[in-house]
Image (cartoon, grey):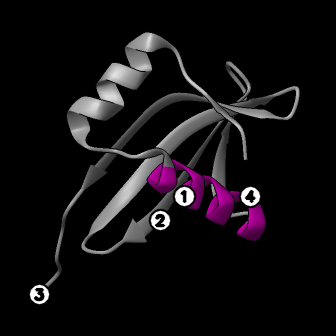
Amino acid sequence: MELQKSAEVAALLESKGIRDEDLIEVIHHGESTGEKFYHPEGNRYMAKKRLSEATYYVVYSIEEGRYVIHSAYWHKSELR
């Protein structure tokens, strides 16, 4: 899977400790299961997946077979 991201997005992801492997796993999950949201404005998708103890969210678009990363974040939560 080929990822593309701007320098600004790459810096944001690095500051949040989000690795390319995390992005790939979340996008693959969204694409293979269909569990993703579509944002018509900007032709973007948002996929999510729980990895370890956090839920990761990735906002991306698909351009010429590449996955363009626009944003990503994660959060930890636990229901009791």
- In which image quadrant can residue 77 be found? bottom left
Q: Which residue is mark 1?
A: 26
Q: Amino acid at mark 3?
A: Arg
Q: Amino acid at mark 4?
A: Glu
Q: Residue at x 45, y 55 (%)?
A: 22
For marks 1 and 4 on the same chain, the one whose residue lies earlier in the sequence: 1
For marks 2 and 4 on the same chain, the one whose residue lies earlier in the sequence: 4
Asked if marks 3 and 2 touch (Cβ < 8 Å), the reply is: no
Q: Amino acid at mark 2?
A: Lys
For marks 3 and 4 on the same chain, the one whose residue lies earlier in the sequence: 4
* First to last magenta residue range: 21-33
Q: Amino acid at mark 1?
A: Val
The secondary element bearing badge 3 is classed as loop
Q: Which residue is mark 4?
A: 31
Asked if marks 1 and 2 touch (Cβ < 8 Å), the reply is: yes
Q: Residue at x 49, y 54 (%)?
A: 21
Q: Which residue is mark 2?
A: 49
